[in-house]
Structure formats: C-alpha cells, structure tokens
Image (cartoon, grey):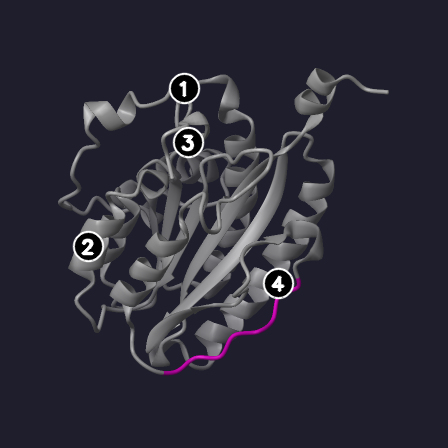
Amino acid sequence: MPKIDELEATARRALHIFYVLDTSGSMTGTPVATLNRAMEETVEVLRKQAKSNADAELKIAVLEFNTGARWIQPNGPENMEDFIWEDLSAGGLTDVGAALSELDSKLSRKAFLNSMTGAYLPIIIFMSDGYATDNYQKALDEIRQNKWFARSTKIGFALGENPDMKMISEVVGNSEAVVRTQDLDLFARLIKFASVTASMMCSTSRTSNQDVTGADILKEAIDQGSAPESIVENVPVDVPESSADEKDSASDGWDADDWE
C-alpha cells in the first residue's frame, strides 16, 4: 500500500482556466460563430492535454457577459475531461462591471477555487469587442484587491474595429498581454494557443517563484511565429502595483495559507 507522502507527491493540484467572454449584440453573426468554433477546438486540445498532464488537474469555467453576466457551469468549474462546449448566442449590452463582480465573487477557496489537493494560480482569458455599457471601474478596483486575481495569469483579446483597448488592458493589467485583431481566424488560432501554452507553463511554474504572465504567453506566440508582433499595442493604462506585503505573502501564490 502506498505511503501517505507518496500519495501526496502524486496528487495533482487543480489548475482553473476561466474564460470571460463578451456575447453582447455586437458579437452577433460571424464573431460569435467564430468564438464558438474556436472554443470547441480549444476544449478538444485541452482535453487531450489534460490526460497527459501529471502535474495539474485542469478545470474550466466560462463566464459570459452581455446584459448581466452568467456562468455556463453554475455549479462551478468542471474537469477538462468531462467538459463539453455548448454554443453561445449574442445579444444585449456589454456589462463588463457585472462580469468582474461575478468573477470576483468566485475567485476564492470558499467558492470556485475549493480543492482538496490545492490550486495553482488561475488562468483568466478575457475577450471583448467593444466598450463597457456599465461603470466597470468600481468592480475593477474591487477585484484588484483579490489576491487570486492579482496574481493570476491574464490574457486579453480585443476583437473587431473598435474595441476598448484601455479597458481590456486595465482588466488584464498589462497592454502587452492583450491581443488586438480584426482577423477572426487569427483570434481562433491564438485563443487555442494561449490556452494550451498557459496551462503548460502555469502547471510547471511551481518550481520557481516567478508568476507566469499573459505577456509571457504572447511573447511565446510571437517567438514561435504563431502571431505577428503587431497584435500587441503599447497602451498606457493606470494599473496599481501590488504591495510588497502582497508579493511577499507567500513564496508560491498557491500555497498562501491565509488566502481565502
């Protein structure tokens, strides 16, 4: 019979991937159809990867926002092996603030990050093609106080002709972690690349004290020739620095015992 310490060594930590997706009226037609195709392909690749990932148990949760925000999995993240993508439809407003408030409420060990084996820092992929129709700033200020959000790996996708780059950059914390493109096929390829690369890098980062950033993921995409350098724009944004106390609260983000 295996010893307790052997069982602990083989236990896989949970790695949560949160998709926060704009399905407002401006996404109607080809954009939402492309999103559905891209996510279906992404899920399939992640499902295959999950079977061979000895370090992490991949889990997925999808939060769509339009007029309000709602989880596609109301009972919480699902294991990657069991997750089945269901197509989204578009319509309504662009309530970014509602989405951030809902995400904030679930980024906690008391909610979606509850795991018997512990959890890696989550991955958050945020996508929008327009401007917020609610006052998102208050919700953004509040979620920035959430340590899980602050130290998560965040990647943004700004689609279409007139996305709010400043808003998306503020949400992910760095304009260098935002893809801007009108090419929906490129978007489909990159959301798959970003998801797979982030899950691989984040599940092996436990041996160092370095957080994996969205900018790291996009640099990898550019270095491998998967994306042109022009997808990243330098947009000045007001992003507060994490406090020294927060940075030093744990040697690894997922082992902070005082985190909720």
Q: Mark 3 points at which residue?
A: 212
In 3D space, how far apart are the residues under numbered discs 2 and 1 (Cα atoms)? Answer: 29 Å
Q: Give the amino acid type for the residue marked by disc 3 in the picture.
A: Val
Q: Do the residues labelled 3 and 1 touch (CB within 8 Å)?
A: no
In 3D space, how far apart are the residues under numbered discs 3 and 4 (Cα atoms)? Answer: 25 Å
Mark 2 or mark 1, whichever is nearer to me: 1
Q: Does the magenta stretch include residue 113?
A: no
Q: Label 4: few (<14), some or many (≥20) within 10 Å?
A: some
Q: Magenta region: which residues? A: 84-91
**In this rendering, would 104 be left or right of 78?**
left
In 3D space, how far apart are the residues under numbered discs 4 and 2 (Cα atoms)? Answer: 29 Å
Q: Label 1: few (<14), some or many (≥20) within 10 Å?
A: few
Q: Name the residue under label 4.
A: 40
**5 and 69: which is toward the camera:** 5
**Mark nearer the N terminus (4 vs 2):** 4
**Mark nearer the N terminus (2 vs 1):** 2
Could you say which quadrant of the image residue 64 lies in?
bottom left
Q: Does the magenta stretch include residue 86?
A: yes
Q: Name the residue under label 1.
A: 209
- The residue lying at 29 percent from left, 41 percent from top is 176
**Mark nearer the N terminus (2 vs 3):** 2
Q: Do the residues labelled 2 and 1 touch (CB within 8 Å)?
A: no
Q: Give the amino acid type for the residue marked by disc 4 in the picture.
A: Glu
**In this rendering, would 37 be left or right of 101?**
right
Q: Give the amino acid type for the residue marked by disc 1 in the picture.
A: Asn
